[in-house]
């Protein structure tokens, strides 16, 4: 019977000390602990998020690096190709120019030769004409003494020789 | 539990004790002062167990050759507005009266508690004497002074144990708090590790799911409650001096704890909570008008919730103590019949006692958990906003 009858003294002390305990722990104990736990929890969460983010960034960075490398390679290749092309072009141009020059020199040489030839021919003709004339003169002087029309005939003959 | 210290008093054990053990609560306790002589010779297991389970004015440590070794505690009485303070050793373990006060040996709700007594006078007639229940104490015929207004706020064994537990708890939690303050966000060290384990459990697995978003306001109270119950349960399992008091198995203690829950629940009750009590939704109207059956049931429910809390903790812890004591008492019961049988029984008894103590450790935790969880659920129901409940439905 006494077991289930609460004693007033114990109720009094229990109420008093439990309230004091709850007050002290509620003021100086639990808030500190709970705050620290919360802080740590947020810190851990943030750290995990940060780690995740960093990993993502690293991945992105790596991808970026690869991209850059690839681009650089491509650029290098393109530059090389370009250079090769330019050099080829320059080579070709130089070759062409040289050809042209050679051609030109050749042509001019030919022309010169032709000109000299013509000159020589003209000279030869003139010389031939003069010689012919001289011969003819000499011949004719022999004959002219009687007939002058032979001179024009001889000239006409010389012209025919040139044309041939 | 502390029984093994109770020594030679139990050497002469009667078969009566065996019956007492098994019919512990059925047997009418007729162990009045007249049987004092029989008590010294026989062993009354029921009385022994109850003695250990109940509160006392001194902290009994052991009895050696009929000599009681115990720590006497201060007795504080307020009698008719006057304050009295003296040492409990004046009662000589209940064998003597001091001034006008004595530890009542009579049954009927006052047994083992201090009462104001008066000597039986010549002028009283026999009819009045029968009513008043006379008992002899220290060679005098005494009777309980029923007219006295006596407030007994003595520092009893349980109060003493309560102070020890509170000092321990204060040290533990404040040390842990200091640790957190000093170490900041670093991992906890020392006692803080134990405290953190329990705090995280109570916070994340008990209070947060039970109360919901408003849980922070109630967290300190529920944490204090959990730690208080858990620690006192554990202290109760320790069989010798600093522990062993059946504090959480005392109805006064569970009454105060349940009252705290009751007050906090109803003070923080929202309008919605009260409306639900008076006008329960989802119930046919004829259960409310003209006879307010449902509101009546709901209002009764408001009170039964904390009462159930009170009884559950009290009954669980007390039952555990009684079973543990019972196993130890078996040794003395059998030993009383024949010392050889007692010796034979003792290993079995001790084994069972160890098993029960281990079980009690589990119960200590479970009961603290259940009390806190139910308190949190009751508070959670009281502070819930309507839309939360609708969501739940």
Image: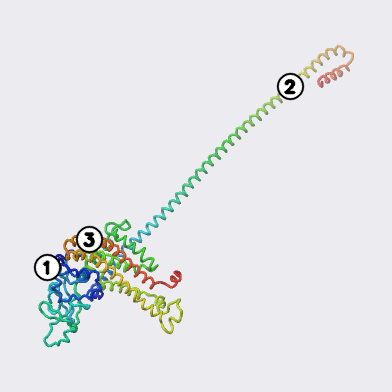
The mark nearer the N terminus, 3 or 1, is 1
Q: Which residue is drawn at 33% across and 67% down?
A: B370
B351 w.r.t. A126: above or below: below
**Label 1 Cα neighbours within 10 Å, binned few <14 / some 14-19 / many ≥20:** few
Q: Which type of secondary structure does the marked residue at label 1 adopt?
A: loop
Q: Name the residue under label 2.
A: A117
**Label 2 Cα neighbours within 10 Å, binned few <14 / some 14-19 / many ≥20:** some
Where residue B366 is drawn, which disc sits there? none
Q: Which label sits in the foreground, 1 or 2?
A: 1
Residue B212 x %, y % = 39, 67
In the shown orientation, is residue A133 left or right of residue B48? Answer: right
Q: Distance between the residues labelled 3 and 1?
A: 24 Å
Q: Which label sits in the foreground, 3 or 2?
A: 3
Residue A18 x %, y % = 26, 70
Q: Report the quarter where the N terminus of chain B lies.
A: bottom left
Picture quarter containing residue B298? bottom left
Host chain of mark 1: B
Where residue B350 is drawn, which disc sits there? 3
Q: Which type of secondary structure does the marked residue at label 2 adopt?
A: helix
Where residue B66 is drawn, which disc sits there? 1
Q: Report the quarter where the C terminus of chain B lies.
A: bottom left
Check the image and name the residue furthest to the right: A146
Q: How far apart are marks 3 and 2 (CA)?
A: 147 Å
In the shown orientation, is residue B158 left or right of residue B389? Answer: left
Picture quarter containing residue B335? bottom left
In the shown orientation, is residue A148 left or right of residue A97? Answer: right
């Amino acid at each position: 019977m006494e077991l289930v009858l609460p004693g007033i003294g114990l109720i009094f002390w229990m109420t008093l000390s439990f309230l004091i305990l709850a007050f002290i722990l509620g003021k100086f104990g639990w808030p500190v602990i709970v705050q620290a736990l919360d802080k740590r929890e947020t810190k851990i969460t943030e750290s995990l998020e940060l780690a995740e983010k960093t990993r993502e960034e690293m991945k992105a960075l790596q991808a970026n690096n690869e991209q850059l490398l690839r681009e650089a390679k491509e650029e290098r290749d393109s530059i090389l190709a370009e250079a090769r092309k330019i050099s080829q072009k320059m080579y070709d141009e130089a070759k062409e120019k040289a050809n042209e020059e050679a051609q030109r020199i050749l042509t001019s040489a030919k022309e010169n030769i032709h000109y000299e030839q013509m000159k020589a021919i003209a000279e030869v003709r003139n010389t031939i004409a003069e010689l012919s004339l001289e011969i003819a003169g000499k011949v004719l002087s022999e004959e002219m003494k009687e007939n002058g029309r032979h001179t024009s005939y001889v000239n006409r003959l010389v012209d025919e020789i040139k044309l041939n | 539990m502390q029984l093994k210290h109770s020594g030679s008093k139990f050497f002469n054990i009667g078969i009566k004790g065996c019956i007492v053990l098994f019919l512990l609560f059925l047997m009418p306790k007729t162990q009045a002062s007249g049987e004092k002589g029989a008590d010294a010779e026989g062993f009354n297991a029921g009385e022994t167990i109850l003695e250990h389970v109940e509160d006392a004015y001194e902290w009994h440590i052991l009895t050696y050759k009929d000599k009681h070794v115990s720590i006497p505690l201060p007795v504080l009485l307020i009698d008719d507005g006057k304050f009295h303070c003296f040492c409990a050793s004046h009662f000589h373990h209940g064998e003597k009266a001091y001034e006008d006060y004595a530890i009542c040996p009579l049954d009927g709700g006052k047994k083992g508690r201090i009462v104001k007594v008066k000597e039986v006078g010549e002028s009283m007639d026999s009819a009045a004497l029968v009513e008043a229940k006379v008992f002899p104490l220290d060679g005098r015929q005494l009777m309980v002074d029923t007219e006295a207004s006596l407030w007994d706020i003595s520092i009893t064994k349980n109060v003493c144990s309560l102070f020890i537990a509170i000092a321990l708890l204060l040290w533990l939690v404040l040390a842990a708090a200091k640790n957190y303050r000093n170490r900041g966000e670093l991992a906890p060290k020392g006692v803080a590790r134990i405290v953190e384990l329990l705090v995280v459990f109570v916070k994340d697995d008990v209070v947060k799911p039970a109360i919901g978003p408003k849980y922070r306001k109630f967290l300190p109270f529920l944490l204090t409650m959990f730690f208080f119950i858990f620690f006192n349960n554990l202290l109760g399992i320790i069989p010798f001096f600093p522990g062993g008091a059946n504090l959480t198995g005392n109805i006064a203690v569970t009454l105060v704890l349940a009252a705290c829950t009751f007050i906090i629940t109803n003070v923080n009750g929202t309008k919605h909570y009260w409306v639900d009590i008076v006008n329960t939704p989802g119930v046919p109207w004829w259960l409310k008008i003209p006879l307010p059956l449902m509101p009546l049931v709901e209002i009764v429910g408001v009170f039964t919730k904390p009462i159930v809390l009170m009884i559950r903790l009290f009954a669980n812890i007390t039952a555990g103590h009684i079973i543990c004591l019972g196993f130890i008492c078996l040794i003395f019961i059998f030993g009383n019949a024949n010392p050889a049988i007692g010796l034979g029984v003792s290993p079995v008894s001790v084994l069972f006692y160890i098993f029960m103590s281990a079980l009690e450790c589990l119960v200590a935790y479970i009961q603290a958990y259940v009390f806190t969880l139910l308190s949190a659920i009751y508070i959670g129901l009281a502070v819930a906003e309507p839309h939360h409940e609708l969501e739940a439905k």
